[in-house]
Amino acid sequence: MKDGVIFVATGQGYVELAIQAAQSLRATNPGLAVDLFTDSANATGLEVFDEVHPTPSSHPRVKLECFSRARFERVLFLDCDVLVLAPLGDLFALADRFALSIAHDMRRCTKLIRQGHTAVTPYAFPQMNSGVMVYRNDAEMSAFFAEWKRRYDAAGVTRDQVTLKDLLWESDLRFYVLPPEFNLRRVTELDAWEPLDAIPTILHSHRLLQHLRGQGARVTTLAELRVLEREALEQEWAALAGAAPWSR
């Protein structure tokens, strides 16, 4: 099959999030194939997926092993903490020109997002967020994913973006940086967007899994997220008391 979406979810909480995300995908993109890789094949609600595949191992970043196992030629990988808000349009066409399409990570002023393992990169080359990726499922990307996993295992780090940053910097892979509406990490950005700027398409927020981390009640809608993020934004600026890298 040419185009499709994959999720990777291990454990009941993440499976439930994947189901919620897949339901939002179905509502906005009817007819698009969507598969799940999971260690919970008997979970309730998996009928929202076209096919359910077992995860190949218990690796802490087992998604690195699942990417090239997708049955699609052009693949959209989504983390479980997403909501698809609009039709994807011709997003998959990027894979005809670029092996990988991926968005910049947020908090690019911080050491966390500046971190690489061995490579030193310019400030303008931060980590990429691996929670939303469009890729061409071919031999080149299979080798890329295998090398990413090899570097991740060798580095002994927790976040897979660290070694991904090094690999993208050092490789000759032809990749594209997605515009923010396809990996919307801050819904407060919508407060500044003008009507013709962009259409928010894929919302990706850690607040959608805050209930799994004991950080608050479960969040399921864009409206709830906007309230929480506006409050958090005001608190963060207030705590800096004018000591921000740039003035508000």
Image (spheres, grey):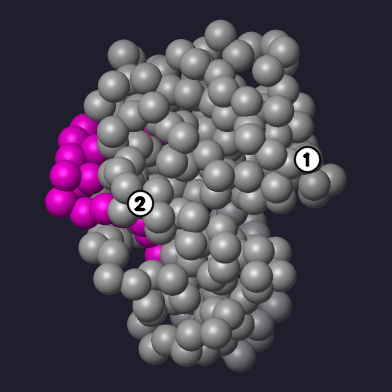
Above or below, 67 against 15 in this view is below
Q: Nearer the viewer, residue 235 or 164?
A: 164
Front: mark 2 or 1: 2
* Residue 195: % across, % down: 23, 47
Q: Is residue 184 left or right of residue 79?
A: left
What residue is shown at x 47% (from left), y 76% (from top)? 166
Q: Which numbered circle lies on residue 141?
A: 2
Q: Is residue 20 positioned above or below 45 on the image?
A: below
- Residue furthest out toward the right: 214
| Mark 2 / mark 1, whichever is N-terminal | 2
Place residue 191 in its image quadrant. bottom left
Q: CA distance from mark 2 to mark 1?
A: 32 Å
**Where 102 falls versus 137 (above or below)?**
below
Foreground pick, 200 / 73: 73
Amino acid bearing label 1: Leu
Q: Which residue is mark 1?
A: 212
Residue sitting at 65 percent across and 64 percent down?
153
Residue 100, which numbered label?
Answer: none
Q: Residue at x 70, y 47 (%)?
A: 59
Horizontal side of 64 relative to 141 (left or right) equals: right
Q: Position of residue 146 (x, y in %)?
A: 49, 55
Taking the magenta stretch, the answer to whether it contains residue 101 is yes
Q: Under tag 1, what secondary structure?
A: helix
Secondary structure of the residue carrying numbered label 2: helix
Q: Amino acid at mark 2?
A: Met
Residue 176: x, y in percent? 26, 60
What residue appears at the point 65 percent right and 70 percent down from the top-left corner?
154
